[in-house]
Image (tube, helix red, strand yellow):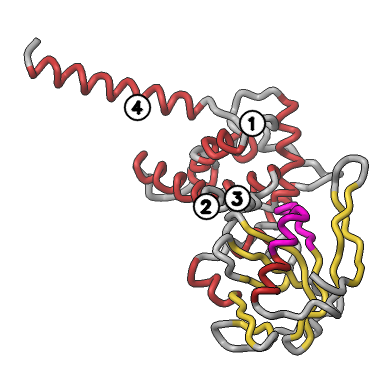
Amino acid sequence: ESPRHDAAALRLQKVYKSFRTRRQLADCAVLVEQSWWKLLDFALLNRSSVSFFDIEKQETAVSKWSRARSRAAKVGKGLSKDDKAQKLALQHWLEAIDPRHRYGHNLHYYYDCWLHSESKQPFFYWLDVGEGKEINLEGKCSRFKLLSQCIKYLGPKEREDYEVVIEDSKFLYKKNRQIIDTSFGPRDAKWIFVLSTTKTLYVGQKKKGKFQHSSFLAGGATSAAGRLVAENGTLKAIWPHSGHYRPTEENFQEFKSFLNDNLVDLTDVKVSILQYDSDKNYTTSPCRVDTL
């Protein structure tokens, strides 16, 4: 065969493979029993949501794939480096790959509805412009609530405002040197933290449906996550509680080891123990720990 025929055959194969891949991706849908890696594949589809149809300037296929891969990488970042890292729970994967980052807890109600509808449309397409766009789960989560509760995902520069260092056993923000004191603000305010897989600590005030554990690392994997109380920079209490990451006892031990490495005395710090109910859902029970 001539070189020209070979080149034509190679080009035809590439075109066919490209079409086959796009067709497979277009037919893809998230299923509960899918593995994390299959969910990662589905993250490549996030550009097919209505949020990407109403952009004035149409993007090229290459640009869409680039954006999708970038978001998928953020969500899974750290897992390949740290086998103990916690990825987002399934319902919050939906939040992470949703271009609007609608609160995963709310999205999951509509995801369950989509799952039982046996629709052949991809979830986000179904939800925003397809067969499910008129569905309003008023008793569980109204459309208004779904659209109004969007989680803020921090970029690299924004994240710097929440980075915390420990100096002389005092917790303070690295950027402005402000001492952390969670007693300021509303009495019912909850302060949350995540420890990245590179052992960087981030702390901020939780705002339900707006700013939560997934905000700090834009859905990325963590070594530990939970709540804390600090007075004038001194740690008073910690809880391994995060609905987004579902931390294990091993994750909590990781955080206590981090505190120990930074010479934080836990003798008088109130610490919660993870407990599990009959459905294997965890709760926390406050107690006092004397030593590590």
| Quadrant the C terminus occupies | bottom right
Residue 194 is marked as none
Distance between the alpha carbons at the discs numbered 1 and 3: 17 Å
Residue range (magenta): 240-254
**Which residue does the numbered mark 2 point to in the structure image?**
81
| Residue 71 percent coordinates (x, y) | 50, 50
Q: Amino acid at mark 3?
A: Ala
Q: Of helix, strand and loop, which one carries label 2? A: loop
**Of circles 1 and 3, which is in front?**
1
Q: Nearer the viewer, residue 275 or 65?
A: 275
Residue that mark 4 sits on: 18
Mark 4 / mark 3, whichever is N-terminal: 4
SS class, disc 1? loop
**Given this view, does label 1 or label 2 mark the residue nearer the observer?**
2
Q: Amino acid at mark 2?
A: Lys
State the image coordinates of residue 5 (x, y, percent, origin top left).
12, 15
Residue 38, quarter of picture: top right
Name the residue beneath numbered marker 3: 96
Q: How many C-alpha atoms fall within 10 Å of the one at disc 1: few (<14), some, or many (≥20)?
A: few
Question: CB under 8 Å between callouts 4 and 3?
Answer: no
For label 3, the crowd category at 10 Å Cα-Cα, with few meaning under 14, some 14 to 19 and many 20 or more, is many
